[in-house]
Image (spheres, rainbow, N blue to C red):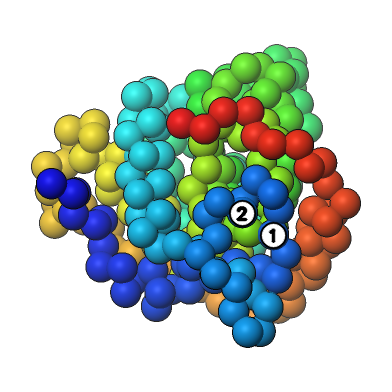
Amino acid sequence: MAEKNLVELERYLKTGSHIGTRFKTGSMKRYIFKKRKDGLNVLDVENIDEKIRVAAEFISRFELSRLVVVSRRVYGKTAVTKFAEATGARALTGRFVPGTFTNPSGKEFIEPHIVLVSDPEVDSQAVKEAIKVRVPVVALASTNNYLKDIDLIIPINNKGRKSLALVFWLLAREILKKKGEIKKDSDFSMAESDFEYEMQEGSEREEDDSQKRFDRRGREGNKRPFRRSW
């Protein structure tokens, strides 16, 4: 019998979790459900739900104190911070300091066992260093993302603050269930809204400017496929 969805599929639609970009990469093509009349590619919500479940199962195999979750995105800061608070992981937001995973003499040095990033391009420095130290990388990926060096993805809108809140809330809940720290969904004390970035003056412009910069980089990026598919 098929497993029950993690949330009602309508929740993914309401948060825009299925909305991609006008760009699509070859490695993300398999996750695209359709292309809208306005040119936006749309992700399959059933697949989103399934991949969150798979990612939670995979991440739960590791010691959570050695999980590092990274988001340079403005809209991802609250989500990853709350995720870390709930699970005991380490959150890194804003600019990723080069050498964080690779320079033992650096003040910011961390030895992760697994890395979770909110965007493979935006968080590319974290991905590169994770690969150098040979730890697996899990990534949230939209239709425009290249998946080189990514071990496991969750296909989702990784740019919207509501979709980021939903995916990190669900991941935290499901990981804690897999770890046996909570028994059922209702035991999870944190609300989805706790994970949502609170808009501040200028934050939307900052996020938009950042996205334009990385969209340009993405179109010129490496088109090789990702390493493995779990």
Q: Inspect this view and state whether residue 192 appears.
A: yes
Secondary structure under badge 2?
A: helix
Viewer-side residue, 155 vs 127 = 155
The location of residue 131, given as percent across then percent down, is 67, 23
Q: CA distance from mark 1 to mark 2?
A: 7 Å
The amino acid pointed to by label 2 is Lys
Label number found at residue 29: 2
Question: Circles 1 and 2: CB distance less than 8 Å?
Answer: yes
Q: Residue at x 24, y 57 (%)?
A: 5
Dividing the picture into quarters, in which one does residue 133 lie? top right
Dividing the picture into quarters, in which one does residue 13 lie? bottom left
The location of residue 12, given as percent across then percent down, is 38, 68
Q: Inspect this view and state whether residue 193 appears.
A: no
Q: Is 156 left, or right, of 172 in this rendering?
A: right
Label number found at residue 208: none
Q: Is 92 left, or right, of 82 in this rendering?
A: right
Give above or below for 195 relative to 177.
below
Number of marks: 2
The residue labelled by disc 1 is 24
The amino acid pointed to by label 1 is Lys
Q: Counting other residues with Cα less than 10 Å from the Cα at mark 2, is it few (<14), some (14-19), or many (20 or more)? A: some
